[in-house]
Image (spheres, rainbow, N blue to C red):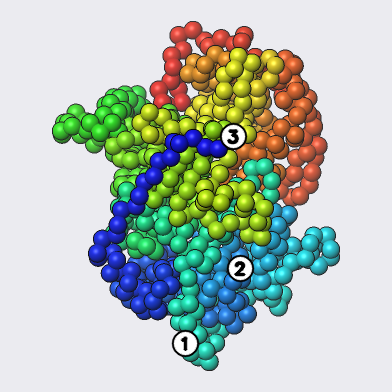
Amino acid sequence: MTSDKTMPYAAEPATSEARATRVASSAAYGQGSGETFPRLLARLATERADATALQEKRYGIWQPLTWAQYWSRVRDFAHGLGSLGVERGEIVAVIGDNRPEWLIAELAAQSIGAAVVGIYPTSIGEELHHILSLANVKVVVAEDQEQVDKLIRLRAEAAAGELGPLRIETVVYYDPHGLEQYTEPWLRDFTEVEAAGREWAESHAGWLDEHVAAGQAADVAVICTTSGTTSKPKLAELSHANLLAMAEHLTSIDPIGPKDRYVSFLPFAWIGEQMLAIACGLSKGLTLSFPEDSSTQKSDLREIGPNVMFSPPRIWESMLSEVQVRIDEAGRLKRAVFGWGYAVGDRVAERRIRGRAGRFNPVAWLADQLALRPVRDQLGLARIDHAYTGGAPLGPDVFRFFHAIGVNLKQIYGQTEICGIAVVHRDDDIAFATVGTPIPGTEIRISDAGEIQLRSASVFRGYHRNPEATAEAVDAEGWLHTGDAGYLDDAGHLVVIDRAKDVVTTKDGTRFSSAFIENKLKFSPYVEEAVVFPTDSGMTAMITIDPQTTGAWAEHERLSYTTYTDLAGKQEVRDLVAEEIVRSNEDLPESIRVQRFVLLHKQFDPDDDEITRTRKVRRNVISERYADIIAALDEGLDDLTIRSLITYQDGSRVERQIVLRIVDLTTFRVPEGRGRRPVWSGRA
């Protein structure tokens, strides 16, 4: 049973120009089959042949690829896949960092009717085996030696019976460094496959065009892994129609066009990057830029100055932390100027998000030029028009900071199963505690149990080879059961509480979200991750510190340390974090304030299954692995001795005893005269 709170938002009809464009595109490959990514690329290669489609930075120089060159390489690799025996309906896996070759492989597979499953480059062992075996992958496209070594080891373990069987017949790599001496006959260089494709095309004239023409909008285009917070990730099948409907509906709210720039640095395995870089990118002709590597990502972002950006909360949180560190290192005059500018920007933002921007304000203009624009420029956000966050909740305080400095940041809500987005803020209607209203073409309702349910043309086809889970996720009427608890406020905005199973009720009947409290704690620049646990003695928390900002603070305080474990064990750091939590508690109802906490001796690691590849906490793993620490927090102990196995870079392992001190906030007192720090600074 569901309530009658159903909110239909019909998509507006396409303009005559847009309809004509779609017809022309379809006509080139036959009528009635609907739009697909390869056909969109073919159209762009004709209409905008010499315009830049992709650019990758190599050795400090941007290397462009035009739409015509892009389509030519896709055709070559598609023929190459055909020569390797890839057939319509099969799945090609791609694992590695974002490079043009990833997109070339993806579009090539889709051109011949195959689908692509993206794998996070950090995936290892059983997780990697699970995806490759479930998708029955025959050809894997891997980035470099690191990924190839994983696959060699995986094949050997499967052959020895240590793992289940794998079908992998060919591995194609696109970064040959370090692979020159490898002799495995099933390894192929990416450029070799392209060359083989050109040869194969000579004896198969018209073969690729027939496959592109035969493609259907309902065909599976991409298979994205779910976050897997409670179990092994499921494989969600998304069609061309699913993704393009999402792109059409999103861009009807926030128009983007061929002149807009997008920097692609988040994994293509994530639905968010597929959503904007590929679906919106191909449907609107965006230019995609790829940073040289992770170490140059910030400078490359600043150099390009994207117009559109979509990142999970951790990226925005890290940007805020960067600002806090830099401002704390600045002189008194610069700090004072920024503080004044921020206060002005905050007042202007408050009016703007309520739709009351008003006329030109010379004071606001001056504050922007002197204090706020330089900060946006340093972050690479000087040209940003549309900025989004999603994948996890973003704290309202972080949200407010970016609006105060002039970044039009908007929260989106969605899941992999609905192409990543169903709800978004509008420019003049932003509430920091909500995720906005549904995009056109999306319906939303709240069940009697408080579950958020969604329906649109972007709801996925189902989980690959898992009909039981598909039936649980999507009912007979097409409603996607998200598993999230939430409600619609008086303005029609959706408020997401948490995963329904994670909503907790305290002794006094207060219902709360663990994520809400954790986001309050993570607003501190010194807190990287926080996991809270309700216990008989009150709310407790397990904290991991941010090594960058906490390390910078320690240097400023002339506090020496060696390792992360050493830094987290310092009494001064415990006091620093305790003060931050006390400030966070002031914004929480008394019944859910954190009473006791511990600083963990290590960071949470996806390789240890403690967090997902998208950095969502796996609560069941944390609860089981750190059960002794949780019990000590509940029992009121002052400290706890644990054994930790440390693996060094040379592979050697040492077991150490570590004493974890537990901080009781009921007896902690903030030093007198210590004011509350401003949002833009780490100092009180």
User: In x, y percent, where is residue 527?
Assistant: 55, 30
Label 2 vs 3, first from the N-terminus = 2
Q: Amino acid at mark 2?
A: Ile
Q: Nearer the viewer, residue 222 or 367?
A: 222
Q: Nearer the viewer, residue 632 or 514?
A: 514
Q: Which residue lies under the disc numbered 1?
A: 206
Q: Nearer the viewer, residue 419 or 147?
A: 419
Mark 2 Cα shell of 10 Å, populated few (<14), some (14-19), many (≥20): many
3D distance between C-alphas at marks 1 and 3:
52 Å
383 sits to left or right of 603? left
Is the Cβ of the residue at disc 2 closer than 8 Å to that at disc 3? no
Q: Amino acid at mark 1?
A: Gly
3D distance between C-alphas at marks 2 and 3:
33 Å
Visible residue check, residue 323: no
Q: Secondary structure at mark 1?
A: loop
Q: Secondary structure at mark 3?
A: helix
Q: Which residue lies under the disc numbered 3?
A: 500
Q: What residue appears at the point 52 percent right and 59 percent down from the top-left corner?
A: 238
Q: Which residue lies under the disc numbered 2?
A: 91
Vertical placement of residue 400 versus 678, above or below: below
Is the Cβ of the residue at disc 1 closer than 8 Å to that at disc 3? no
User: In x, y percent, where is residue 87?
Assistant: 60, 77
40 sits to left or right of 183? left
The N terminus sits in image quarter: top right
Q: What residue appears at the point 57 percent right and 32 percent down from the top-left corner?
A: 449
